[in-house]
């Protein structure tokens, strides 16, 4: 039982490059989330998926897109990376929105 | 947007000392969760409190939910270096027809051996 897995763990991009962060959970959870964490800013919600087939914007969605591929998988795409997107990205899941969340180990992204 | 204020932001103490961190809001929450995040890892759920006045214990950690369900505290007895990390509180509230979770910015605890 792996919980929430994320790939990759580390990534360096040049400005303007694109990439997709992958997330999968094996807990049969309905809701999944993408956060970014920056020093002094706390966890900020980028996008969430309350249930399979739905996605909604969070607090800081600009520059990102998401896909809820199926109940297990929720990906985050940066179409044209910018230095302001340098951050640590966490995926999380919960049985229902607003319930206890379970986090992945994070992806450390640097955009130069 | 429901705001959660955590205090203090930073805390550095010696091994063996006791400490309390706080999580406060002007809003009422249906439940409140505490997470611990160790350096380089994702947050890990420690406890959920649901009832006003509820007290839960997890070894040397004691969690309390305020009577009015607007605040919570985490008390650590005889802190150890393994307690070092970022402690996050998160409040669940009902809004726009569903429950939402909002996180505080955390208290960064360093326990010095």
Image (tube, rainbow, N blue to C red):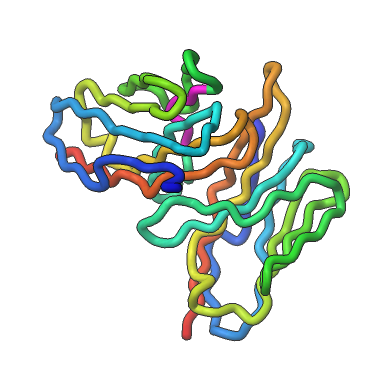
Compared with A99, B9 (above or below) is: below
The image quadrant where one finds the N terminus of chain B is: top right
Compared with B12, A23 (above or below) is: above
Q: Residue at x 48, y 64 (%)?
A: B85
Q: Residue furthest top?
A: A53
Question: For residue A3: magenta?
Answer: no
Q: Residue at x 48, y 25 (%)?
A: A48
Q: Residue at x 66, y 33 (%)?
A: B2
Compared with A109, B9 (above or below) is: below
Spot occupied by residue B29 in the image (x, y as percentages of width and height): 75, 38
* Frontmost residue, B5 versus B78: B78
The picture quadrant where one finds residue B17 is bottom right
Spot occupied by residue B14 in the image (x, y as percentages of width and height): 54, 83
* Frontmost residue, A100 versus B89: A100
Question: For residue A45: magenta?
Answer: yes
- Span highlighted in magenta in the image: A44-49
* Frontmost residue, B112 versus B43: B43
Secondary structure, magenta segment, majority class: strand
Spot occupied by residue B26 in the image (x, y as percentages of width and height): 75, 39
Spot occupied by residue A72 in the image (x, y as percentages of width and height): 43, 29
Total number of numbered discs in the rendering: 0
Compared with A19, A100 (above or below) is: below
Q: Residue furthest front?
A: A1
Q: Residue at x 33, y 41 (%)?
A: A6
């Amino acid at each position: 039982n792996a919980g929430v897995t994320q790939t990759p763990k580390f990534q360096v991009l040049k400005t303007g490059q694109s990439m997709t962060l992958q997330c999968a959970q094996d807990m049969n959870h309905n809701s999944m989330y993408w956060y970014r964490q920056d020093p002094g800013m706390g966890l900020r919600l980028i996008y969430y998926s309350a249930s399979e087939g739905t996605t909604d914007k969070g607090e800081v969605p600009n520059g990102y897109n998401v896909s809820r591929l199926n109940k297990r998988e929720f990906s985050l795409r940066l179409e044209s990376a910018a230095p302001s997107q340098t951050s640590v990205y966490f995926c999380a899941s919960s049985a229902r929105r607003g319930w206890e969340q379970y986090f992945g180990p994070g992806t450390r992204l640097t955009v130069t | 947007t429901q705001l959660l204020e955590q205090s203090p932001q930073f805390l550095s103490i010696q091994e063996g000392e006791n400490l309390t961190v706080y999580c406060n809001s002007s809003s009422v929450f249906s439940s409140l969760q505490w997470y611990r995040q160790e350096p380089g890892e994702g947050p890990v759920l420690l406890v959920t409190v649901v009832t006003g006045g509820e007290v839960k214990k997890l070894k040397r950690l004691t969690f309390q939910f305020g009577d009015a369900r607007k605040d919570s505290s985490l008390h650590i007895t005889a802190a150890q270096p393994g307690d070092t990390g970022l402690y996050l509180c998160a409040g669940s509230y009902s809004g726009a027809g569903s429950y939402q979770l909002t996180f505080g910015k955390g208290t960064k605890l360093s326990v010095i051996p």
